[in-house]
Amino acid sequence: MPKNSNLALFRRGIPQEIIFIFLVVFAVTLLAVDIKMQVLDPARQIVSLGLYPLQKAVMFPRDVVILGQGVMNAAELIQSENEALQRRRIELAQVSSSSAQLATENAQLRRLLGMQNDKSEQPAVVAEILYEAPTPFNRRLIFDRGELDGVAPGMPVIDEGGVVGQIVRVTPVSSEAALLTDVVVSIPVQLARTGLRLIAFGSNQPGKIEVRYFSSDADIKPGDLLITSGIGGAYPAGLTVGKIDTVDRDASSGFAFAIATPASHPDRYRHFLILRNLLNQQSSQTPSSPQNVEGSTTNAAGDARARRSLN
Amino acid sequence: MQPETPVRDALSTKRTGMRAQGTAISSSLAATARRTNDPLTIGIDGRWVWGTIAVIFLISLLPWRVLPYTPDLLLLVIAFWCVHDSQRVGLLTAFCLGLLIDVQSVAPLGQHALTYVLVCFGGLLIGRRLQRFDLLRQTLHMMPIFIVGISITILLTALLKDFWPGWGWAVSAIFTAALWLPFGWLLQMPSNRLASQSLGQG
């Protein structure tokens, strides 16, 4: 016999209003705790791990279609990619010859100055986008590599254009990256032209980043290239971040801010590179590593220490 | 709890001797009700209810909601069944599915759960009244509930995160509510068929 709800004469069980109030209070508490603190991540990881096979299963048709398209246009795709790569190879050959020369020169100068050499090879993981996060509050990408592949929170993600973002959460099989344009991300940068050290933040404008907290008479103009400064140790130095669009100088407050466009294209390709060592290895290094030292006075102290250790 | 035969329960919870009579009353009542072709009394198959929720949940796991102004189909379907089958689908279902969507969409835990609970409670409150209306009027009634429910959550999250996400979500909320009409028609297809069948017999 089918259920006929209208035949119920009396309500039984817990009243809906009580359940409603309880669930609303619970949800609001969860919301506040999750936004203000990072304590719920283990629970999220477990649920996420449970959802992963389901997601993989429903995305299977899409993956098959993408694979099919790849097979259909294979010849065309390979040809165009090959041409692009050839062009790139010629460009890079030039760059790499001059860069090798600069590297030896740099190493020699560093030896002369008695500075530690902080450049090291960075093992990286190639990751593919699993999906993009569909919320209005975040600019996030979910990758198909997780803790099992050596990915950890804090690692930078790059593509061929430059820095894409930073890993913020990991599960054993997937990881979540906040894009540069996400409001939670801040990245230490410097101007390639003048070497001015700045900090770039995610912006309220979609697809843009903001550079804040510099004095209104600083030498910075539209078209300037932003690169990572390496300060703080989360990002290696010298990666392209973006290009300045506009500079807004406020004479009354004495401060200015600039809007920049990221150089990376997180919406264009499916594969990205997660740089592996950095924070995790750096924390085990000597604390006097010049890369970790912020400010010119402390930098000088670090140099002096390095010089002493050399003598 | 036996919602199948509530009349019998009400009549003979302690007097077991009258059970047979009670059942007779209940079945005759149900039979009368079915003959009136009242959409209220047409039974809804539980497999259909849970099946549609499961399918829409799986569709929600796909990354199509990245596109702007996309409706929240899962919210729509849960709210619809809260109105039309509150015996099976209730606030707890809404809350749990909301949490799963929170994890999937890397939103703060509780964001979708809160929206789903608010909208479903609104649906439960006016559910009885709503069932007497056709789908167009139901859509008009549900529109403010969807908008208010989603707005509360977005405002709360924006306040906690100190970040305003723009107005895209409002369009999405209106779109979700507007889809009540076509989705309601789809989801009611089996019971409509049952209704026309029983009308033919009567």
Image: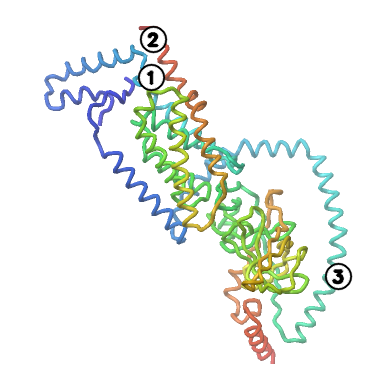
Residue B175 position in % (x across, y down): 54, 35
Query: Circle 1 sits on which residue?
Result: B39
* The C terminus of chain A - image quarter: bottom right
Residue that sits furthest to the front in the current view = A252
In the image, residue A290 sits, relative to residue B123, either above or below, namely below
Q: Residues within 10 Å of mark 1 (few under 14, many from 20)?
A: some
Q: Residues within 10 Å of mark 3 (few under 14, many from 20)?
A: few
How many angstroms separate mark 1 from mark 3 (CA)?
80 Å
Query: Circle 2 sits on which residue?
Result: B199
Residue found 35% across the figure and 27% down from its top: B129
**Discs 3/2, front:** 2
Residue B5 position in % (x across, y down): 25, 23
**Discs 1/3, front:** 1
Residue situated in front as seen by the camera: A136 or A83: A136
Residue situated in front as seen by the camera: A308 or A159: A159
Residue situated in front as seen by the camera: B167 or A193: B167
Which quadrant would residue A74 be assigned to in this image? top right
Work out whether disc 3 and disc 2 sit on a shared chain: no
Indicate the amino acid at tag 3.
Ser
Query: Circle 3 sits on which residue?
Result: A98
Residue found 65% across the figure and 65% down from its top: A200
Residue A41: mark in rendering: none
Indicate the amino acid at tag 2.
Leu
Secondary structure at badge 2 equals helix
Q: How many marks do you count on the picture?
A: 3
Q: Residues within 10 Å of mark 2 (few under 14, many from 20)?
A: some
Lateral position of residue A56 relative to residue B83, left or right: right
The chain that hosts pointer 3 is A
